[in-house]
Image (cartoon, rainbow, N blue to C red):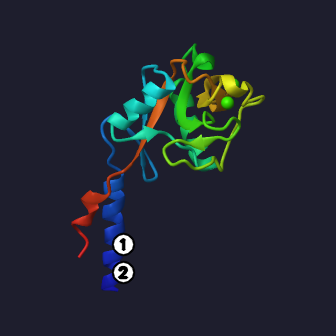
């Protein structure tokens, strides 16, 4: 019984630690997410996330897609420019056309939520976006465009470790 209580307490402490993202970052599961206010090219956005010890956001499931699109719709609910607002994700088909990979891991995308008629521009559009015009479903976009971006990092769980042992 004591063990179970300890385990529950440990989980609670870990959850508490997980809930702490830096100011301005939003907690989701074991992630912290930052929705940018500025616009950069895909490469610049990727470098900016790295400088923050993060990477451009990956989307591994319908739940994650739903979280990001819901957050973005809320963030832009009174924004007249919603339909022309796009956010970079970590995905690219720069290496092999039509083969979309998460650049931070090199893994092929296993989940996609393409907007109608996307991806549509082949070699001219090699970077992955969430697109306001389609309630932030995915699209391909030219990497040199300046867009908003989403940085993502794993929550630092180290703060919970001092309770172990
Ligand atoms: Ca492409
Ligand atoms: Ca496109």
Q: Is mark 2 within 8 Å of ligand 1?
A: no
Residue 85: which quarter of the image?
top right
Disc tally is: 2
Element under disc 2: helix
Identified at 57% across, 38% down, the residue is: 91
Q: Which residue, given by chain and number where applicable, does mark 1 sit on?
A: 8
Q: In the rendered image of this protein, does residue 127 appear above or below residue 147? A: below
- The disc placed on residue 4 is 2
List x then y, in percent, for residue 98: 71, 37
Identified at 68% across, 41% down, the residue is: 99
| Picture quarter with the N terminus | bottom left
Between the residue at mark 2 and the residue at mark 1, the CA separation in whole angstroms equals 6 Å
Mark 2 closeness class: few <14, some 14–19, many ≥20 residues within 10 Å: few
Identified at 72% across, 24% down, the residue is: 121
**Depth check: 1 or 124 in front?**
124
Q: Is mark 1 within 8 Å of ligand 2?
A: no
Mark 1 closeness class: few <14, some 14–19, many ≥20 residues within 10 Å: few
List x then y, in percent, for residue 44: 43, 25
Identified at 44% across, 32% down, the residue is: 46
Judge from the rendering whether residue 54 lies leftward or rightward of residue 148; answer left or right.
left
**Depth check: 59 or 107 in front?**
107
Q: In the rendered image of this protein, does residue 46 appear above or below residue 157? A: above
CB contact under 8 Å: marks 2 and 1: yes
Q: Residue furthest right?
A: 117
- The disc placed on residue 18 is none
**Depth check: 118 or 84 in front?**
118
């Amino acid at each position: 019984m004591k063990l179970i209580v300890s385990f529950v307490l440990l989980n609670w402490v870990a959850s508490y630690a997980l809930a702490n993202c830096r100011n301005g970052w939003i907690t989701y599961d074991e992630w912290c997410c930052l929705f940018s206010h500025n616009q950069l090219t895909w490469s610049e956005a990727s470098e900016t996330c790295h400088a923050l010890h993060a990477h451009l956001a990956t989307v591994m499931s319908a739940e994650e897609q739903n979280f990001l699109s819901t957050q973005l719709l809320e963030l832009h609910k009174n924004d007249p420019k919603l339909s022309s607002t796009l956010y970079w994700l970590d995905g690219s088909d720069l290496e092999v056309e039509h083969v979309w990979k998460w650049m931070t891991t090199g893994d092929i995308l296993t989940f996609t939520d393409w907007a109608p008629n996307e991806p549509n521009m082949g070699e001219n559009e090699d970077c992955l976006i969430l697109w306001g015009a389609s309630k932030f479903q995915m699209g391909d976009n030219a990497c040199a465009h300046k867009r908003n971006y989403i940085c993502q990092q794993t929550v630092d769980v180290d703060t919970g470790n001092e309770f172990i042992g």
